[in-house]
Structure formats: structure tokens, C-alpha cells
Amino acid sequence: MNASSGSEDVLARVVWSVLAEPGDAVAGELIAALGPDESLALVRRAAVDGASELLEQVGTVASFADGPDRVRAALESAIERWRPRLGGADDRAVAAMASGAAVGARLLVPGTPGWPSGLDDLGPHAPFVLWSRSELDEPIAAAGCRGALAIVGCRANTIAGAEATAEIASAAADDGIEIVSGGAYGIDAVAHRVAVAAGTPTTAVLAGGVDQFYPAGNHDLLRNVLGRGRVLSESPPGTRPTRWRFLHRNRLIAALSDATVVVEAAARSGALNTAHHALHLGRPLFAVPGAFASSASVGCHRLIADGSAQIVVHPRDPVEAASAVAVHLEPPAAAPVVLGTRSDPHVTRALDALERRPLPVEEIARRSGLSVDDAADALALAQLEGLVAAQAEGWCRR
């Protein structure tokens, strides 16, 4: 396992990946402003002595808070969020590095060779580190890829969806385009299988550690991916995937790609979350139309009807867009600005249930009429747009 940045900063970044959940904007901004090692030291002192010194170093302007008077509150909330994991964090970071080395994973940090530059567009939501697992020395760079295309969709795909995925992935392989997806059942699996069969590089982004492939039914597929590309994760080895981490994983799929195509997506498919990330990043988004009565295509039809995604008329449409972005040309057609997650009915209901004072997710579920799982998913989406804040006592509006 190698990372050519300073060893103290590398270890500090791994510790941060143990402390903070993926996409934590407070952690990301502290690291960007103070460096991983210094910010970690200040947080540790703040957990004992209070946030005054940390606040002095950060200043009163921060993207994770709405105005100077809320910076302290955001920092104090973050410290409480990280406090349960501070004890023994160094030991867990060292153990994660050992577990990664045991399966041949490579540790990547920003600014070092192999770090995907597209992730920098995530700003404070960028990952602290990446764990890359491959059987190749240079899984992507040496292949001379002409861009990267994310192919995503529902797990319970139809035959038509699988056929459309195979055609798009084949067109991408013909053009030397890397295929990026999430390693899940359904559309993801079809995209990876076509890439492996065609001999083109493919990246599977996991929501858990790279030392344990998930889902278990795709173990052999992910092993095959190692021979044609890589498996990536921002979560330390040993981390189990959760619903929360799947949502945050989707931002990496979008940021790693020059364009994204949604092949099939139900009304509340996680693929729509990936689509929203792609549009927030300004990357071209495409959606494949399906049968009028197909529940597997409702999400795609909505993206097209809202003007958020371009319709895939030919399998080469998203491929050409990815290639154009990769070589810094204007894509064939610009995608309109996405409607925010506010348009998601579950997000709307969760927001309506919130107050300025923190509420536990169970109370938000009761007020909104959602299940606890659906309420948690809606709050996670809203947090990505800065609409809500997670505090030690629960969730509240920003």
C-alpha cells in the first residue's frame, strides 16, 4: 500500500476516514483549511477543552454554516458527532491500513499519482482517502482511456434494461471509454460484465470496505473487475455498507465520470441520487426511455420530462458526451440544471416535519408519515444540499 504524501498527513487522513462519515462537509473544510494533521489535532483538543481554539483557526466564514454565528454551532455539533469514535481512532486507522494491505489495496490521497482529479470537484464533500484494489499496476491510466462514463440503474432490471445497458457499455468499450458503476445487482452488474468481456477498464465503487465484496452474489463479478480495472471505496477496510453510505457513494460515481446515463430507475431508485450529483457537478446526464407502463422506467421518464436529462436516442449518445468532456470539448448537447432534491416528495415531507430544534429521526418519521428508513434516506438527500443539519440530538433545519 503506497501513498507518497507526508506519512503524518496520510495517517491523519485515514484517521479522518475512521472518524467522519463519507461526505462530511465540516471535516472536509477543516482538512482543506488547516491540513489533515493539524485539523485532527485541533479537533482532539476541542473535544477536551471546547471549540474556541478551533473556531479561532477556522475563522467565521465556512461553507458548512449559514453565517458566522452558526460556525461555532456547526463545529460543536461535528465534534459531538465524532466524539464516540475519537477514542482508539489511531489504532483503528492502523488496523484499516493493515487490512487493506492484506488484500493488496492501494491507498490514494489527494495530490498524489492515481488520485482521480474529478473528485476534487466535490469540494468539502470530497473523500479523505481512497482505497483502490486491482490486479493491475495502473488499472486506468495505463489503459489510455478517452474518458469515463457512469452507467447506473435499478437492481431489479428488465430484459430491455439489460439489453440497453449492454449496447451502451459496448459502445463505450469500442471508444476506449472507462465504465464506472456501483458493483450492485441489476444494471450495475450488466455494465461491469460487458466491460470485462470487452476488455475495457471498469471501476466499481463500493459503499463498504474493499476487503469485503458486497453484494455477496456479485463476488465473482467483482473479482473479475479486479483483472480489468479496479474496485474503489472511501470507507476503510472492514466497513460494512449501509443505506446511508450507498447514498454518499453515489456522489463518487458521478464525480469519477465525464457523463452519466441512467438506464432504468424506479420512482425512488438510488440511481436518481447519482443523477442529481452528476447535474450538480455540471456533468452531462442521459436517461434511457422505457415502456410507458414500466415501473422500472418511471425515474428515467421523470428526469427527461423535467428537462434534467437528455434522452438516449442512440447508444452512442452518452458515450460521445463523455468523450467530448474528457478532451475539454463542448458536449453534443448541454443538460439543463437539475431540479433540487426539494422536488422529491419524501424530502418535502421530511423537511415539513423539521423544526429549528433537533428532532430524532423516529419523531420525524412519525410527523411525516414515512417509515424510519425512508425518513433517514430523505434527510441524507437533504443534507447533501445543505438543507438540514445532523446534530447529536437529532436533525434540524439549517
Image (tube, helix red, strand yellow):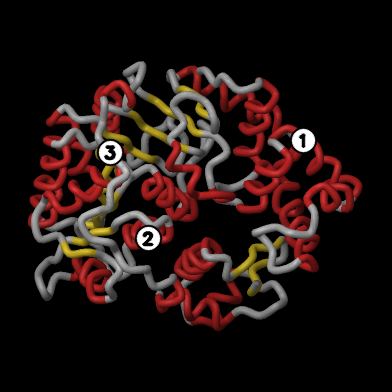
Type of the residue with mark 1: Glu
Residue 26 vertical placement versus 396 (above, below): above
Q: Circle 3 sits in a helix, a strand or a loop, which is it?
A: loop
- Which image quarter holds the C terminus? bottom right
- CA separation, marks 1 and 2? 34 Å
* Picture residue at 11% right of the left edge, 40% below the top: 170
Q: In which quarter of the view is residue 8 placed?
A: top right
Q: Is residue 340 left or right of residue 160?
A: right
**Residue at the disc numbered 3:** 147
In-front residue for pair 193/107: 107
**Residue at the disc numbered 2:** 279
Q: In which quarter of the view is residue 135 placed?
A: top left
Near mark 3 (Cα within 10 A), the count class, few <14, some 14-19 or many ≥20, is many
**Residue at the disc numbered 1:** 38
**Which of the two discs, 1 and 2, labels the residue nearer the N terminus?**
1
Near mark 1 (Cα within 10 A), the count class, few <14, some 14-19 or many ≥20, is some
